[in-house]
Image (tube, rainbow, N blue to C red):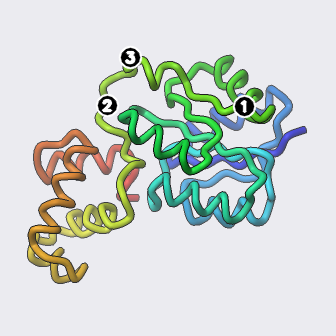
C-alpha cells in the first residue's frame, strides 16, 4: 500500500483527496495546509507520494526544492488552477513528477497517480489545452518575496512602508505589486487582497 502526504489550504479539498485515495488503497499518513509543515511531514513519514494543492506560506518551486531535499525518492504531484506553459516547464525542471488540474475528476486523478508511481512524468492535458476555468494565474507561482509584499499589503502598509520593511527600493515594490496583480488577476490592491483571502493566501 503506497503512503501519501496531502497538502492544501482548503480543508474540504484535503478531505476529498484523502477519501478518494483511501478508496483506492492508498494510505494518507499526514495532511496539512502549510508548506513548512509539509516538509516536516515528508521527513517524518517518508511517503511514496506527495500531493500538493494550494498552500498559504510557500511558493510551489520552494516546496519542490524542500521535498527533493527531504525525500529524494518521493513522487511529487502538484495540483494547479491554471498556469502559463513556462511555469509548467519550470516545475517539470524541478523534478515535479505530475502536474494536475485542481478540477480533475476522481477517476482521472487515480489513473494519473498510478502512472506517477510507476515512474512516468504526467501532465494533465487540461493544463495544456487551456480549457480550464479562467480563475487567474495560479497563486502558487507567487515568489516568497511577493508573498511578503502581499502580507504587508494586508496590514495596510503603503508602498513606502513596504519598501522600508523589506529594505528594497520603491520601484522594486511597484514591480512586485505588478507581478502580484498579474498572478492574482487583480487590477488594484483591494482586488488583490480579496482574491488572496479567497484563496487562503493570507491565512
In space, the residues marked 2 and 3 are separated at their CA atoms by: 11 Å
- Split into 4 quadrants, where in the image is the N terminus? top right
In this rendering, the label closer to the viewer, 2 or 1 = 1
| Residue that label 3 marks | 131
Circle 2: element type: loop
For residue 16, what is the image quadrant?
top right
CA gap between label 2 and label 1 equals: 28 Å
User: Which quadrant, please, contains the C terminus?
Assistant: bottom left
Q: Which residue is mark 2?
A: 135
Q: Determine the secondary structure under disc 1.
A: loop
For label 3, the SS is loop
Q: Position of residue 183 (x, y in %)?
A: 27, 44
Q: Residue 33: percent from the left, percent from the top?
A: 55, 54
Frontmost residue, 156 versus 166: 166
Q: Answer with left or right where residue 134 lies relative to residue 188.
A: right
Given this view, does label 2 or label 3 mark the residue nearer the observer? 3
Q: CA–CA distance between discs 1 and 3?
A: 24 Å
Q: Residues within 10 Å of mark 3 (few under 14, many from 20)?
A: few
Q: Is residue 178 left or right of residue 137?
A: left
* Mark sitting earlier along the chain (2/1): 1
Answer few, some or many: residues within 10 Å of disc 1's Cα (few below 14, many 20 plus, some between 14 and 19).
some
Residue highlighted by disc 1: 120
Amino acid at each position: 500500500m503506497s503512503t501519501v502526504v496531502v497538502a492544501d489550504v482548503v480543508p474540504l479539498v484535503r478531505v476529498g483527496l484523502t477519501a478518494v485515495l483511501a478508496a483506492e488503497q492508498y494510505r494518507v499518513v499526514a495532511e496539512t495546509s502549510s508548506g513548512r509543515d509539509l516538509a516536516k511531514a515528508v521527513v517524518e513519514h517518508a511517503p511514496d507520494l506527495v500531493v500538493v494543492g494550494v498552500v498559504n506560506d510557500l511558493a510551489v518551486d520552494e516546496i519542490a526544492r524542500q521535498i527533493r531535499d527531504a525525500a529524494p525518492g518521493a513522487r511529487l504531484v502538484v495540483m494547479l488552477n491554471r498556469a502559463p506553459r513556462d511555469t509548467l516547464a519550470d516545475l517539470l525542471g524541478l523534478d515535479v513528477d505530475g502536474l494536475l488540474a485542481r478540477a480533475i475528476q476522481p477517476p482521472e486523478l487515480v489513473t494519473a497517480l498510478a502512472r506517477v508511481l510507476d515512474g512516468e512524468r504526467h501532465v494533465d492535458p487540461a493544463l495544456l489545452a487551456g480549457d480550464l476555468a479562467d480563475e487567474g494565474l495560479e497563486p502558487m507561482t507567487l515568489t516568497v518575496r511577493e508573498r511578503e509584499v502581499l502580507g504587508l499589503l494586508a496590514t495596510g502598509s503603503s508602498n513606502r512602508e513596504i519598501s522600508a520593511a523589506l529594505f528594497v527600493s520603491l520601484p522594486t515594490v511597484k514591480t512586485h505589486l505588478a507581478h502580484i496583480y498579474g498572478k492574482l488577476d487583480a487590477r488594484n490592491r483591494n482586488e488583490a487582497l480579496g482574491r488572496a483571502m479567497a484563496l487562503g493566501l493570507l491565512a
